[in-house]
Image (cartoon, rainbow, N blue to C red):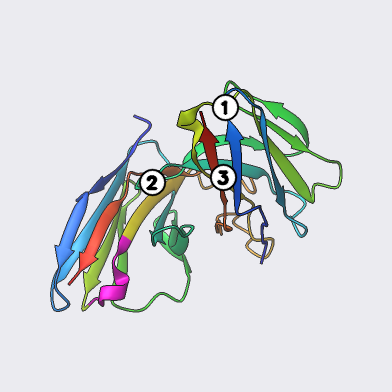
């Protein structure tokens, strides 16, 4: 079963760059890495997805090294509204359909003024 | 339409009641999911439907019964629940045919309280 490991919590200040790393040592060859953000009492929301190297969109960047055993979500210039839980997801390599999508523990980010 | 709609938003039920949670999407997604989330814990996968067929059941007790009437609808029938089943129930959908690159779109959740 693919498993992800992330720091339980992180603190930051407004305007800083935040990097959250996720370990996924047994990621399947054709699996992507997807990151979600969740606010209390809401469903998780898609942030970014990548397969290798670097992906950037309007809210975040995702860095994936060549061995793909980890990934780093980078949030530039965080604000108070970025306080949330962040999850990285990879599929279960034993599930051929690729929809065995289980959440790891996530990282609780607290942004302070 | 890029949303997953869940009803009701809140549900209170007794242990002998029968109730249902409903989920709807009109994005043409072919995979639909039920997750259960307790406070300050990550979502736990319960069921996955792929092309209207149940493909994953994560050893969920039989008091939870999923149903997928068509590709846009997903129900979760609840019967004889326990107080510990109180949680936020999240529905999600994904395209379902992109091996390894499925992106989940979640609803806002149904907050269930079992008395």
Identity of the residue furthest to the right in this view = A66
Task: Tell me which corner region of the image, top left, top right, bottom left or bottom right, holds residue A60.
Answer: top right
At horizontal 14% and vertical 79% (from top left) the residue drawn is B16
Q: Position of residue A51 (x, y in %)?
A: 73, 39
Say which chain tag 3 marks.
Answer: B
Q: Which residue is mark 3?
A: B102
User: Where A101 sits versus B115, above or below?
Assistant: above
Q: Position of residue B31 (x, y in %)?
A: 45, 51
Q: CA distance from mark 2 to mark 1?
A: 18 Å
- Position of residue B15 in the picture relative to residue B56 (left or right): left
The quarter in which the N terminus of chain A is drawn is bottom right
Q: Position of residue A87 (x, y in %)?
A: 57, 48
The secondary element bearing badge 1 is classed as loop
Tell whether label 3 touches label 1 (CB within 8 Å): no
To the question of a shared chain for discs 2 and 3, the answer is: no
User: Where B52 sits versus A15, above or below?
Assistant: below
- Position of residue A6 in the picture relative to residue B31 (left or right): right
Query: Residue B77 lies in magenta, yes or no?
Result: no
In front of the other: B24 or B107:
B107
Q: Position of residue A78 (x, y in %)?
A: 57, 27
Q: Which residue is mark 2?
A: A40
At horizontal 77% and vertical 51% (from top left) the residue drawn is A29
Q: Which residue is mark 1?
A: A78
- Mark 2 vs 1, N-terminal side: 2
Query: Residue B85 lies in magenta, yes or no?
Result: yes
């Amino acid at each position: 079963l693919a498993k992800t490991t992330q720091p339980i919590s992180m603190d930051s200040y407004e305007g800083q760059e935040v990097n959250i790393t996720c370990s996924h040592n047994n990621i399947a060859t054709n699996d992507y890495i997807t990151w979600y953000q969740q606010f209390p009492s809401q469903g998780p929301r898609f942030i970014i997805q990548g397969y290798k190297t670097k992906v950037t969109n309007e809210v975040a960047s995702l860095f994936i090294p060549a061995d793909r055993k980890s990934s780093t979500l980078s949030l530039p210039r965080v604000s108070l509204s970025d306080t949330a839980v962040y999850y990285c997801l990879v599929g279960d390599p034993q599930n051929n359909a690729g929809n065995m999508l289980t959440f790891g523990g996530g990282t609780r980010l607290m942004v302070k003024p | 339409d890029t949303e997953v709609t869940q009803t009701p938003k809140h549900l209170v039920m007794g242990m002998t009641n029968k109730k249902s949670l409903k989920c709807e999407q009109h994005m043409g997604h072919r995979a639909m999911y039920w997750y259960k989330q307790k406070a300050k814990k990550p979502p736990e996968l319960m069921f996955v439907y792929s092309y209207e067929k149940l493909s994953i059941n994560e050893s969920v007790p039989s008091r939870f019964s999923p149903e997928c009437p068509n590709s846009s609808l997903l129900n979760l029938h609840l019967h004889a629940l326990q107080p510990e089943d109180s949680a936020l129930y999240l529905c999600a959908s994904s395209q379902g045919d992109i091996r390894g690159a499925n992106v989940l779109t979640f609803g806002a959740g149904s907050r269930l309280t079992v008395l």
